[in-house]
Image (cartoon, rainbow, N blue to C red):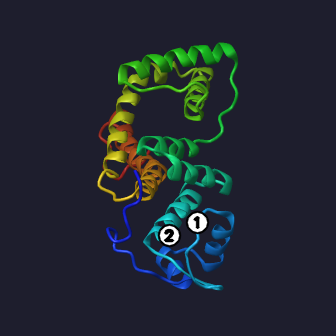
C-alpha cells in the first residue's frame, strides 16, 4: 500500500518550523531525522530552505510513536521504516513493525524449547495462526511458557486455549481500527499505539476486573469498596 497522492490527502506545503509544530517533534530532532535518513528530504526552495508536506508529518508521527510509545532504538526504527517503504503489502510491514516491539527473549534449553514449541503449534493450528521459525515473538512466547512451567503453575498452561481466544478477539479490535486509515504510515502508527498502549489499557481494565473477581471468590459479603 503506497501513500496517497498529495492532492488526495490535502497537502499544505510548510516550512521546518511549521512541520515541527504540526508533528510535535522539535526542530532539532527533525533535522537529526533528516540527516539520519529517517525522514525524506523536503522540496528545496533555496540552498538553505525546503518545503514539507503532510507525508512528512505522517512520517514524523510514525517515528515518534515508534520511539516514544514503542521504545525502539533509532536502528530498529530505521528497519521498520525500511519495511514501510519497501513492503508490497500492509501485512508484511505490520509484521515487521509489531515484531520489533517484542523484547529480546531469553534462551531456553532444547528440551524446554521442544515442549513449548509443541504446545504453541497446537494452539496455533487451532486458531489458524502461522508460526515463523526463530521469530522473536515466537521465542518470547516459548520463553514465557517455560517460565510458567518452571514456577509450577500448570493450571495456567492448562487454560492457554482460553488466553489464545482472548488474544484473537483483541487482535480483531487492534487491527479493525486501522482499516479505514489512508496511508501505510498511519496504519502502522495506529497498530503500534494500539499494541503498546492497548496492552497498558487492558492491564488496567484487567486489574479492575481482578479486584471484582477476587471479592466474589474470597470475600463473601464484601462491599463494593473492599480492595484486594
Q: Which residue is drawn at 52% across and 48% down?
A: 86
The percent coordinates of residue 194 (x first, y second) are 42, 52
Q: In this view, does 10 lie to the left or right of 50?
A: left
Q: Which residue is drawn at 64% across and 50% down?
A: 76
Residue 118 in the image, given as x and y percentages of width and height: 52, 14
Is residue 211 visible in the rendered image? The answer is yes
Q: Residues within 10 Å of mark 1 (few under 14, many from 20)?
A: many
Mark 2–mark 1 CB contact (< 8 Å): yes
Tell me the residue that label 2 is attached to: 56
In the picture, measured across the screen, residue 212 lies left or right of residue 203, that is left
Is residue 159 at least partly visible in the picture?
Answer: no
Measuring from the top left, give residue 44's x and y in whole percent.
57, 80
| Mark 2 neighbour class, 10 Å CA radius: few under 14, some 14 to 19, many 20 or more | many
- Is disc 1 placed on a helix, strand or loop? loop
Per the rendering, the mark at residue 227 is: none
Against 101, residue 5 (above or below) is below
Residue placed under numbered mark 1 in the picture? 39
Q: Nearer the viewer, residue 213 or 6?
A: 6
Amino acid at each position: 500500500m503506497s501513500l496517497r497522492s498529495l492532492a488526495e490527502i490535502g497537502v499544505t506545503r510548510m516550512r521546518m518550523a511549521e512541520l515541527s509544530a504540526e508533528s510535535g517533534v522539535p526542530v532539532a530532532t527533525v533535522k537529526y531525522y533528516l540527516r539520519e535518513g529517517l525522514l525524506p528530504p523536503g522540496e528545496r526552495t533555496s540552498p538553505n530552505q525546503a518545503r514539507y508536506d503532510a507525508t512528512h508529518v505522517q512520517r514524523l508521527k510514525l517515528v515518534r510513536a515508534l520511539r516514544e510509545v514503542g521504545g525502539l532504538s533509532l536502528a530498529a526504527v530505521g528497519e521498520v521504516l525500511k519495511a514501510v517503504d519497501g513492503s508490497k503489502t500492509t501485512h508484511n510491514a505490520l509484521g515487521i513493525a509489531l515484531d520489533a516491539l517484542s523484547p529480546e527473549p531469553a534462551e531456553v534449553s532444547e528440551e524446554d524449547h521442544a515442549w513449548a514449541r509443541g504446545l504453541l503449534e497446537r494452539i496455533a493450528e487451532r486458531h489458524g495462526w502461522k508460526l515463523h521459525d526463530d521469530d522473536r515473538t515466537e521465542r518470547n512466547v516459548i520463553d514465557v511458557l517455560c517460565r510458567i512451567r518452571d514456577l509450577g503453575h500448570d493450571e495456567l498452561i492448562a487454560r492457554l486455549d482460553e488466553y489464545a481466544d482472548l488474544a484473537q478477539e483483541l487482535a480483531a479490535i487492534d487491527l479493525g481500527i486501522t482499516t479505514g486509515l489512508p496511508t501505510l504510515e498511519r496504519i502502522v502508527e495506529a497498530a503500534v499505539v494500539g499494541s503498546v498502549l492497548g496492552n497498558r489499557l487492558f492491564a488496567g481494565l484487567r486489574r479492575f476486573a481482578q479486584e471484582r473477581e477476587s471479592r466474589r471468590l474470597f470475600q463473601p459479603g464484601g462491599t463494593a469498596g473492599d480492595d484486594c
